[in-house]
């Protein structure tokens, strides 16, 4: 199974024992999230709604591409790819 490097923002690192980068196995983004949840229970809640869909304020990029413009959570993952989780920023 392919292993990807997932880079997390500071706000999620408290859920991963302060780890900024995780090596996670999975063939799709959905698999990657499931495997991160298995490793760090409760992490998925910060990424996905209870319905399983990606939260509107969470952006996930494979290399430079936002998965929302690819196949969403079903976007395939290849070995060695870098996945970045980036929260939307709003202000006023």
Image (cartoon, rainbow, N blue to C red):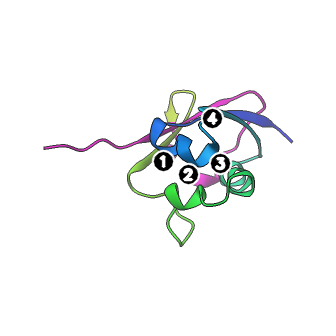
Q: Do the residues labelled 4 and 1 touch (CB within 8 Å)?
A: no
3D distance between C-alphas at marks 4 and 1: 25 Å
Looking at the image, is 51 positioned above or below residue 63?
below
3D distance between C-alphas at marks 2 and 3: 8 Å
Q: Which of marks 4 and 3 is nearer the N terminus?
A: 4
Indicate the secondary structure of the residue bearing disc 2.
helix
Looking at the image, is 30 positioned above or below residue 80?
below
Q: Quadrant of the N terminus?
A: top right
3D distance between C-alphas at marks 2 and 4: 25 Å
The magenta span reads 66-92
Q: Do the residues labelled 4 and 3 touch (CB within 8 Å)?
A: no
Indicate the secondary structure of the residue bearing disc 4.
loop
Reading the image, the residue beneath label 1 is 68
Which label belongs to residue 33? none
Q: Do the residues labelled 2 and 1 touch (CB within 8 Å)?
A: yes
Count neighbours of disc 4 (C-alpha within 10 A) and say few if under 14, some if 14 to 19, many if 20 or more.
Answer: some
Name the spot of residue 24 as percent of width and height, x first. Answer: 75, 40
Reading the image, the residue beneath label 2 is 72
């Amino acid at each position: 199974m392919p292993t990807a490097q997932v880079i997390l923002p500071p706000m999620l690192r408290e859920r991963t024992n302060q780890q900024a980068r995780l090596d996670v196995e999975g063939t799709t983004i959905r698999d990657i999230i499931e495997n991160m949840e298995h490793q760090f229970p409760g992490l998925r809640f910060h990424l996905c709604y209870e319905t399983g869909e990606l939260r509107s304020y969470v952006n996930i990029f494979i290399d430079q591409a936002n998965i929302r413009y690819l196949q969403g959570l079903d976007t395939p993952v290849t070995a060695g790819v870098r996945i970045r989780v980036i929260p939307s920023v709003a202000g006023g």
